[in-house]
Amino acid sequence: MSEPKRHHVVPEFYLRRFSREGEIELVARDDCRAVVSTGVSAALVQKYFYSIDTDQGRDAIVEKMFASEIERPAARAIARVIDQKKPTSFPGLRGAIAAFLAFQFVRGPAARHAAVEFFKAGARKVTSMATPEIVQGVLARQGEPISLGDARDLLSLAQTDDRMEVSSEANVHLSVALKTALKLIPIFLQRAWTILDFPATALLTGDEPLALVGESLAPGEALGATDAPEIVFPTDPRHALILIRPDLKRRDARYSGTQRMADIINAHVAFSCHRFLIRYPGTDPLGGRTIPEKAPPVMTIGDHVIIQPRVSLQERREWLRHQRRRR
């Protein structure tokens, strides 16, 4: 059997929920005037995105696992909960959706970009602190002995070359993402789940469909999946799932959403996306609103490499000012 080559960074079943007769509108995140109508099967596809590199070549085991163990149960569970209005408390449904959300939170292009940049920054920091003696010792333990002079030349080249190549971005990304997803599942299960029903086509999605909402309600706060008051996930243009932090003492619920709620969800999901937004054909859920600029996901401060993958440029500046005041 041939290995799958075309991998959806967001599952096809999910994109189909935002389609009309199999068509969706693909919008550039950084230029919302750039809109393309496309079929679901061709949207958000990257070749070999989840194929890991092994000594025997590419292996699509992760893509196959996503399809059979994560996406297929989630497609059924989301349809049951959203369309058939089954309770989110049903363990078989809640578990399947929580697993899907956990993996989707870490599997997308923005998550990969952050993981790869963190790996590169860490390697640059280690290189900057290394000595010829350390390089010589490391290579000797790997069975590749070199002279101290050659080690000095090698280190000098590494320290003066700003380029940093990663042999397999998929390996770097997925080695962290899969472990992180397993830790997120119980966190998502413990939150209170609210479903919002909107009376009209009101919501968008994109290549990173989960978003974190903080107390200020402004996109781009420095939050993680554990401390975010709310995690929002539009399931289709008229429904959204909201996961509320346990200490806020909410119960599972389902009620009608307002336009204000839709605006908050759309602003945060649009900000969260990496390159593309997805919307139901003929709609404009953002309504011309500007998407805040994202800060680079990784920064180096002194001896520390810090990853903040979902922070706005304005929030990063405020965070840095606060850190300087603390010093």
Image: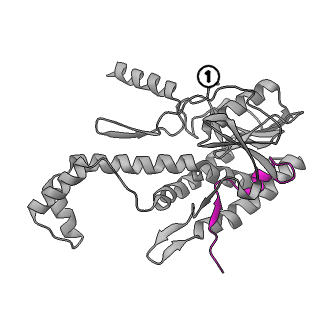
Query: Left or right: where does residue 112 sit relative to residue 15?
Result: left
Residue that extends furthest to the bottom in the rendered view of this protein: 1
Q: Residue at label 1? A: 216
Counting from the top left corner in percent of width and height, residue 311 is at 52, 33
Quarter of the image that includes the C terminus: top left
Quarter of the image that includes the N terminus: bottom right
Q: Is residue 204 above or below residue 116?
A: above
Q: Is residue 43 above or below residue 136?
A: above
* Residue located 63% across and 34% down the image: 31
Q: Is residue 323 above or below residue 3?
A: above
Residue that extends furthest to the top in the rendered view of this protein: 325
- Which segment did they paint magenta? 1-22
Count of marks, rendered view: 1
Counting from the top left corner in percent of width and height, residue 55 is at 43, 76
Of helix, strand and loop, which mostly describes the magenta segment?
loop
Quarter occupied by residue 27: top right
How many other residues sit within 10 Å of disc 1, few (<14), some (14-19) or many (≥20)? few
Query: Left or right: where does residue 61 sit relative to residue 133?
Result: right
Q: Taking the image as drawn, is residue 296 in sight?
A: yes
Q: Nearer the viewer, residue 27 or 303?
A: 27
Q: Nearer the viewer, residue 53 or 228?
A: 53
Helix, strand or loop at label 1? It is loop
* Residue located 64% across and 61% down the image: 7
Counting from the top left corner in percent of width and height, residue 157 is at 21, 53
Q: Which amino acid type corresponds to the residue marked 1 in the rendered image? A: Ser
Counting from the top left corner in percent of width and height, residue 207 is at 65, 47
Q: Nearer the viewer, residue 63 or 286?
A: 286
Q: Taking the image as drawn, is residue 86 in sight?
A: no
Quarter occupied by residue 147: bottom left
Query: Left or right: where does residue 129 sit relative to residue 199?
Result: left
Q: Is residue 39 magenta?
A: no
* Residue located 81% across and 40% down the image: 237
